[in-house]
Image (cartoon, rainbow, N blue to C red):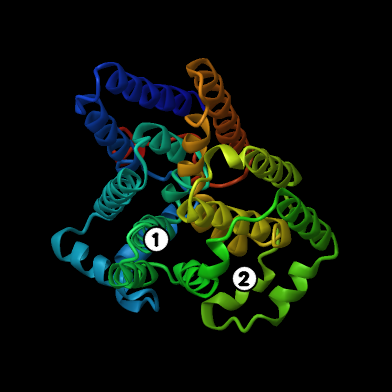
């Protein structure tokens, strides 16, 4: 736990140094290098670490996404060390996320820090590597749809994302089918009604019934049995968090692009409410809730007075830090050989010496 505390403090400090040096970018780029180094040289850290090691060495026998399998083929051509795979994927995930954030918003450092603080986004890439790279590429694809209406690039990057992890097809189709509705602004009462309605539905176990009738096949069949106890605190916090957004939405939701991002975030929370018992489904929410990394800074910097901006910035950073370390605490109490805690590094792991 101490390692992650110091790690995140160092990130915040580097971003702060970049701010006070008037955006010279030196500290910002060093921060990115530092993140890639820590992420890419992790060892036995992340619950899927052993699975990905196995994928690397046995890729020829895998029935898995085309681009992921192709990347393993290329990596195996250059090296027989699976650690290189973890580094390469960390490198491209962070670089693509940073590039996408830079395109979406002028609040680059704040959005990037929030991305890093949300455990389901950044720290999850230590485990679900394929979905992590898919999320970063799909985020870029959505930019071309939302802000540029460049449908060719949208489809191209979406297909690349899907070919790294099939789960990306869900947000891709959702955006196409419901684009008209996502662009609209809805009343506060509408959002509240849907939120409380889906929480009530979750108590009726409707999500269980939906899962039972889904036509899952092949290696996805076992998802129907992948049931876990719901973390009621997580659901409560996410819903209160979104209610806070809705109350202040007139302050920072200014155009249809903002509406799309807000409604995508809203849909992610609906998924969480209804399917909270099913980890494979709740993993999908991160394709949607990732848009909070743009909405939160827009809300913070929408206030007229600098004192209010600072107060809300500190409050949100505190909120994300609490969420992060609560997640790490849960991880530390979970049995497993390759949890996030303790963090282990390839160059300092005694088992490799």
Marker disc for residue 223: 2
Query: SS at mark 2?
Result: helix
> Element under label 1?
helix
Q: Position of residue 93 (x, y in %)?
A: 32, 51
Q: Toward which corner of the image does residue 182 lie, by quadrant?
A: bottom right
Left or right of residue 307: residue 270: right
Q: Which residue is mark 1?
A: 142
Looking at the image, which residue is at 76% across and 51% down? 189
Which of 114/250 is in front?
A: 250
Q: As displayed, is residue 264 above or below residue 212?
A: above
Would you place residue 129 above or below residue 306 in this image? below
**Can residue 194 be seen in this snapshot?**
yes
Q: Nearer the viewer, mark 1 or mark 2?
A: 1
Q: Are marks 1 and 2 in contact (CB under 8 Å)?
A: no
Among numbered discs 1 and 2, the one appearing first in the sequence: 1
* 23 or 259: nearer the viewer: 259
Q: Position of residue 282 (x, y in %)?
A: 61, 58
Going 53% across and 69% down the picture, which residue do you hit? Answer: 180
In the image, is residue 17 above or below residue 199?
Answer: above
Specify whether residue 331 is in view.
no
The total number of labels drawn is: 2
**Observer-nearest of 73 and 235:** 235
Identify the residue shown where x is 39% and y is 71%: 162
Task: Tell me the crowding category of disc 2: few under 14, some 14 to 19, or many 20 or more residues within 10 angstroms, Cα based.
Answer: some
How packed mark 1 is, by other alpha carbons closer than 10 Å (few <14, some 14-19, many 20 or more), is: many
Spatial distance from mark 1 to mark 2, Cα to Cα? 27 Å
């Amino acid at each position: 736990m101490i390692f992650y505390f110091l790690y995140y403090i160092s990130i915040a400090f580097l971003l702060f140094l970049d701010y006070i040096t008037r955006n010279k970018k030196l500290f910002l780029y060093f921060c990115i290098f530092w993140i890639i180094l820590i992420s890419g040289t992790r060892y036995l850290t992340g619950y899927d670490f052993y699975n990905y090691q196995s994928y690397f060495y046995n890729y020829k026998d895998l029935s898995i996404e085309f681009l992921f399998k192709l990347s393993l083929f290329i990596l195996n051509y250059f090296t027989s060390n699976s650690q290189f795979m973890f580094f390469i994927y960390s490198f491209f995930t962070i670089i693509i996320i940073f590039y996408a954030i830079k395109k979406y918003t002028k609040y680059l450092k704040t959005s990037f820090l929030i991305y890093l603080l949300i455990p389901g986004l950044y720290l999850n890439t230590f485990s679900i590597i394929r979905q992590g790279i898919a999320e970063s590429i799909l985020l870029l694809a959505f930019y071309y749809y939302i802000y540029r209406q460049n449908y060719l690039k949208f489809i191209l990057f979406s297909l690349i994302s899907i070919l790294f992890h099939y789960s990306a097809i869900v947000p891709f189709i959702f955006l196409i089918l419901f684009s008209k509705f996502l662009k609209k602004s809805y009343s506060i009462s509408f959002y509240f009604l849907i939120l409380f309605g889906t929480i009530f539905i979750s108590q009726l176990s409707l999500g269980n019934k939906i899962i039972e009738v889904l036509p899952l096949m092949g290696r996805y069949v076992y998802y129907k049995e992948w049931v876990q106890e719901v973390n009621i605190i997580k659901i409560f916090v996410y819903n209160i968090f979104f209610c806070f957004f809705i109350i202040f939405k007139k302050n920072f939701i200014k155009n249809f692009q903002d509406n799309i991002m807000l409604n995508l975030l809203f849909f992610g929370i609906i998924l969480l409410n209804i399917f909270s018992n099913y980890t494979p489904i709740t993993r999908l929410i991160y394709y949607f809730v990732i848009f909070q990394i743009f909405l939160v800074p827009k809300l913070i910097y929408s206030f007229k007075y600098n004192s209010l901006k600072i107060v809300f910035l500190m409050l949100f950073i505190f909120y994300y830090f609490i969420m992060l370390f609560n997640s790490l605490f849960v991880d530390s109490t979970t049995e497993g050989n390759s949890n996030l805690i303790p963090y282990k590094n390839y160059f300092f792991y005694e088992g490799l010496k």
